[in-house]
Amino acid sequence: MNFSDQSYDTIVSTLSFCSYDNPSMVLAKINRWCRPNGQILFMEHGISSNLAISAIQKALNPLLYRTWMSQYKEHFRTDSGVRY
C-alpha cells in the first residue's frame, strides 16, 4: 500500500499485524501516512506476559496459523523506538 505522507487524520488497524512479514516496516509507513497530531489506533493480539499463558499460546501457534493464517508474535521494537 502506498499513500502520500501525512494523508490521514486517523488510521485504524485491527488484528492485522500478525499477518505482515515485516510489521516494523508497516508501522513505519502508518506513522508516515498519519498527519501530525493525528491518531493511530490499534487493536492487536500478542504473546502474554504471563509465562503459563504465553507457553500455551506458543504451543497453539502452529494450529492457529494453519487454521486462520494468524499467529502470535513476540513484541518488536521499531527503529524509531516505538514498541509494539
Image: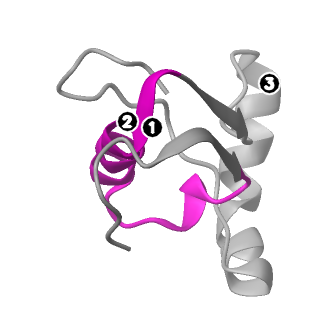
Q: SS of the residue at dot 2?
A: helix
Q: SS of the residue at dot 3?
A: helix
Nearer to the camera, 27 or 76: 27
Q: Cβ–Cβ below 8 Å for labels 2 and 3?
A: no
Q: Which residues are magenta?
A: 14-37
- Residue 60: in magenta span: no
Query: Where residue 3 sits in the image (x, y, percent)?
Result: 35, 64
Query: Where residue 49 sits in the image (x, y, percent)?
Result: 69, 16
Query: Image point 71% across, 19% down: which residue?
Result: 51
Q: Cβ–Cβ below 8 Å for labels 2 and 1?
A: yes
| On-image quarter of the N terminus | bottom left
Give whichever of discs 3 and 1 has the lower sequence position: 1
Q: Nearer the viewer, mark 2 or mark 3?
A: 2
Q: Residue 3 has which mark?
A: none
Q: Residues within 10 Å of mark 2 (few under 14, many from 20)?
A: some
Q: Residues within 10 Å of mark 1 (few under 14, many from 20)?
A: many
Q: Residue 34 has which mark?
A: 1
Disc 2 to disc 1, C-alpha distance = 5 Å
The residue indicated by pointer 3 is 52
Give whichever of discs 2 and 3 has the lower sequence position: 2
The residue indicated by pointer 2 is 31
Query: Image point 69% across, 36% down: which residue?
Result: 42
Name the residue type under label 3.
Ala
- Residue 21: in magenta span: yes
Name the residue type under label 2.
Asn
